[in-house]
Image (cartoon, rainbow, N blue to C red):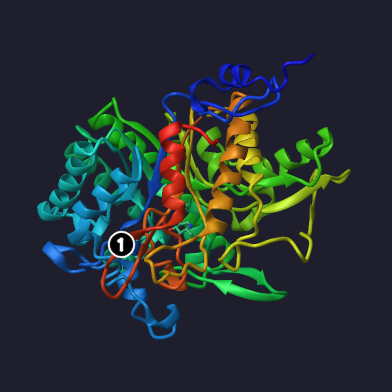
Amino acid sequence: MSNYFDSRDFVKLAGNHVQSGKKMPGATLPTFPEQFLWGVATAAYQIEGSPDADGKGKSIWDTYAHIPGKMKNGDTGDVAIDHYRRYKEDVAIMKEMGVNAYRFSISWPRIFPNGVGKPNQKGVDFYSRLVDELLKAGIEPFGTLYHWDLPQALQDKGGWQSRDTAQAFADYASLIAEQLGDRVKHFFTLNELQNFVDMGHRGTEIKVQGKDVRIELAPGLQLSTAQVNQVSHHAVLAHGLAVQSMRAIRPDLLLGPADVLFTGVPIIDTPANVRAAEIATKKYNERFLDVMLTGKYSDSYLQAAGQDAPKFTEADLKAIGSPLDFVGVNIYIPKSYVEASEDAKGFREVPTSLTHPKMGSPWHSFSPEVLYWGPRLMNSLWKPKAIYITENGCAAGDVLTTEGRVLDTDRVMYMRAVMLNLHRAISEAVPVKGNFVWSAFDNLEWTGGFGTRFGLVHVDFKTQKRTPKLSAAWFKEASQRNGIV
Ligand code: NOJ
């Protein structure tokens, strides 16, 4: 008689995660490595408010959000979720949710109101208090130095079109290393380079229900391809110079970008399609991750760009390719599903089915397998020492019930699927060390305004009342078990 359904076996197989139940032999529950980080993420402009407090300078978002017609419903980050004043309550909520790592961003114009020059100590003090509060709560702080809020004073001098901005960023980064680096060990340089470069400097078209919709970010410029390529170069240069300047101050810091990974996902799992997905992923990231991780622009990029290629020096490439401790990537969707092709490009993009399911944002196809393929392809392409998933998450049509609950069953479904795919990558020895859910709290979704809710915690934007959603309870359960039941 087989003992397939002997519960004692089940306990043995499942480790200490399950006390009773029935399971086929050989199967194991998805448990994550011991030091795995169950993190959440936010960004300064999306949550802080207090745009003029304690000597803060204006950022390009303070300017842009006040241009009539740019933001949905005229929303701005002037108050946002008032985190600047409520950070203690917010840290307490994260602790209660079982968060063990928090990725927050530092507002450059709080630290340097004019982008350069004399630092504003009161701005530094805010982040210092936040970090102390996190450490007290047993939450590991991960700082992002640039989450899109460039000081307006630097924009007035050319912004990312000017090479000086990259140097100013490195100087700001070294001040942060000096002031916070005794307590914050991990820093991400810049967030989603490809998105703020392209969407901020020429806009990106996406298809929504068959129609082209333009997505724009501040400063909302319309530049030529050559100019945009130069902006990209200054962004990766800023990353490289910051890594160098921070290491010069504190060699023990752990550094990497928090870029967005544009991923090719194989339409079906044939070896030829997997290879095509790898080629596509390298190509999609050639102006950003590829140059940061190889220290050179690919020949195919430079040839295709021709006259529009950026101007750079060998010393720039050396800085850009500075060795990193980890690579952080935000992963939400595939750039494309791809299949093998015989032509010189080596892959062909395949349109997604018209009925492909979607999450709450117009651009968000439900494609959780990208959390497996993204890390796997990064690993085979660039062999990073470690990978952090610096963002994933989804917007949902959250409703606060009369009993005060938010039953975001779709977000729970999404997170289960994401974590299972990530687990698959980890079980194939891809070195993913942690995942940061976007976002801890509902917040200002850039031009999408407050109506696009990404939080695990619901925020009533009128009263500022915080209510953890069903997804927060799911997160707590999973982080406490370090696994999924
Ligand atoms: C990526 C960005 O880094 C973040 O600021 C944004 O809110 C999320 N994606 C969701 O769109």
Furthest toward the front, the residue is: 1
**Residue 303 in sight from this viewpoint:** yes
Seen from the viewer's position, the closer of residues 453 and 364 is 453
Rendering coords of residue 10 (x, y %): 61, 21
- Taking 285 as reference, is 36 above or below it? above
Q: Residue furthest top?
A: 1
Q: Quadrant of residue 346?
A: top right
List x then y, in percent, for residue 171: 25, 45
The C terminus sits in image quarter: top right
Vertical comparison of 147 with 375: above or below: below
Q: Is mark 1 within 8 Å of ligand 1?
A: no
Q: Residue furthest bottom?
A: 68
- Residue at horizontal 45 percent and vertical 65 percent from the top: 453
Q: Residue at x 56, y 66 (%)?
A: 361
The x, y position of residue 370, in whole percent, is 64, 45
Q: Name the residue at 79% across, 13% down.
A: 1
Q: Is residue 369 left or right of residue 164?
A: right
Rendering quarter of residue 342 = top right
Give percent across and percent down for residue 297. Answer: 58, 41
Q: Secondary structure at mark 1?
A: strand
Q: Amino acid at mark 1?
A: Arg
**Frontmost residue, 463 versus 372:** 463
Mark 1, other Cα within 10 Å: few <14 / some 14–19 / many ≥20: some
Q: Nearer the viewer, residue 469 or 21?
A: 21
Identify the image quadrant of residue 375. top right
**Would residue 238 be visible to someone looking at this image?**
no
Q: Is 218 displayed left or right of 209 in the figure?
A: left
- Residue depicted at x 59% and y 17%: 8
> Looking at the image, how many numbered discs can be counted on the residues?
1
> Badge 1 is on which residue?
466
